[in-house]
Image (cartoon, rainbow, N blue to C red):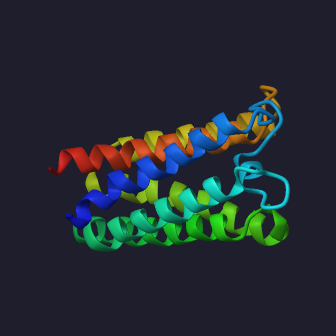
Amino acid sequence: MSLRLSCLIGIAVMFSGITLSILLAPWFSFYDNALSDLGHSTKSVVAPIFNFNLICGGTMLLVYGLSTLRHKYLFTGYIVSLASFFLILVGAFDEVYGLLHFAVSAVFFILMGLASITYSIESGVKLGYIAFVAGILGWLLFWLKVYRMGIAVPELVSAVAVSTWILYDFVKTR
């Protein structure tokens, strides 16, 4: 397997794990929950699926960042790798860990925003800027209570936005 494919595998594993966990958790609501509620090891029967997929997806994206992305865009590659490490920590330190879970989750989202900006600077592709703005808007609208939804919505908006430029770069450099 080419290490370059770890990009596709990582994103596919992460989003399929999130989707499967949502489908298997009838109590989950985009109006009331965070995605991490799916990974709460004492309250969610889908926690093993959710957390395992975050850890596996994060590991694959870490491999991609270090093996492929950093050779094209040095700083972006290292920031994506660090963010991926924090995604692994989100899966390892679920909501049972309280403040630790919040901290590693916040660092993950901040690093992915930073990676988006850095990608646009290093590559000259504006898609990273667009992903950053989409993610920030998702969070701002949530915090300002412009819409009534759970925190899962800005989490998902951010993850999809960042995945868009990562996949774009993967396809662009075939």
Image position, residue 164 (x, y; %): 40, 41
Q: Is 133 on the left or on the right of 80, as rendered?
A: right
Image position, residue 33 (x, y; %): 79, 40
Q: Is 135 on the left or on the right of 98, as rendered?
A: left
Q: Nearer the viewer, residue 44 or 102?
A: 44
Quadrant of the drawing holding the N terminus: bottom left
Q: Is 24 on the left or on the right of 157, as rendered?
A: right
- As drawn, the residue found furthest toward the left would be 174
| Above or below, comparing residue 147 to residue 143 in the picture | above
Q: Is 46 on the left or on the right of 66, as rendered?
A: right
Tell me what residue is drawn at x 78 percent, y 27 percent: 146
Snapshot quadrant of residue 149:
top right
Tell me what residue is drawn at x 54 percent, y 40 percent: 133
Image position, residue 139 (x, y; %): 69, 42
Tell me what residue is drawn at x 58 percent, y 61 percent: 52
Tell me what residue is drawn at x 72 percent, y 33 percent: 141
Does residue 22 show up? yes
Q: Nearer the viewer, residue 122 or 14?
A: 14
Image position, residue 130 (x, y; %): 45, 39
Q: Nearer the viewer, residue 168 or 88?
A: 88
Q: How many marks?
A: 0
| Above or below, comparing residue 149 to residue 7 in the picture | above
Does residue 132 show up? no
